[in-house]
Image (tube, grey):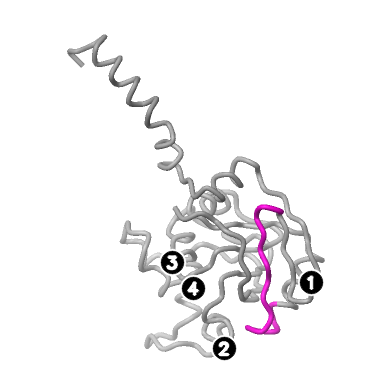
Amino acid sequence: MDKFESFSGVAAPMPLVNIDTDMIIPKQFLKTIKRSGLGVNLFAEMRYDDAGNEIPDFVLNKPAYRNAEIIVAGDNFGCGSSREHAPWAIKDFGIKCVISTSFADIFFNNCFKNGILPITLPQEQIDVLMKDAEKGSNARLDIDLENQTVTTSEGESFSFEVDPFRKHCLLEGLDDIGLTMEKAGAIDSFEAQAGQARPWV
């Protein structure tokens, strides 16, 4: 997993509430077990018509937001089924951070495991960020995980909370496998001792 670094990015405004995982990545795209290639299907039923053509009014199809790296969303983002394909699709599209007033628990946890920073802020601050995002690609939000701040294009800054362990994992690029591999020396030592003590195993 790549290390999460502070960045300045375009934010796509998505004021809908209860954006569920089936909206994020519809069920017909769940056949793959690969984490890559799903970005083109992100929000597929809202991005494309029945013939596969882009729907111009959808935010990620607008020129200003095609390279968005942040989503500012309504309440209860990521609800619905527990499919990990949802953060896979978000990450593959290029989104590094999702900001909302609340997230479904499983989606929230899956974000951290896939290098995405989910930020929870109160509604009045979301309103400010949503308005700023609506300005288009000329307005960029600054995301600073180290100092735990989100700063608007006009310099207004909001602080957010993040679990210290999860923050460490994002900053160091550690998923579950990476965390395990940090203990590789201890694992090798245990296996060597176990092999000597129980050679029949």
Which secondary structure, mark 1?
loop
Q: Which one is earlier in the sequence, the residue at label 4 or at label 3?
A: 4
Q: Residues within 10 Å of mark 4 (few under 14, many from 20)?
A: many
> Residue drawn 40% across and 85% down?
50
* Residue 38 vertical position relative to residue 50 in the rendered view, above or below: above
Identify which residue, 103 or 81, lies in the foreground.
103
The numbered dot on residue 155 is 1
Which secondary structure, mark 3?
helix
- Residue flagged by tag 3: what amino acid is it? Asp
- Residue flagged by tag 1: what amino acid is it? Gly
Q: Verify whether residue 137 appears in magenta.
A: yes
The numbered dot on residue 57 is 2
Q: Nearer the viewer, mark 4 or mark 3?
A: 3
Q: Which residues are magenta?
A: 133-147
Q: Is 136 on the left-hand or right-hand side of 122?
A: left
The numbered dot on residue 92 is 3
Q: Which one is earlier in the sequence, the residue at label 3 or at label 1?
A: 3
Q: Residues within 10 Å of mark 3 (few under 14, many from 20)?
A: some
Q: Nearer the viewer, mark 3 or mark 1?
A: 1
> Residue drawn 53% across and 67% down?
95
Q: Are marks 2 and 3 in contact (CB under 8 Å)?
A: no
Residue 149, position as x, y percentages in the image:
73, 59
Q: Which one is earlier in the sequence, the residue at label 1 or at label 2?
A: 2
- Residue flagged by tag 4: what amino acid is it? Phe
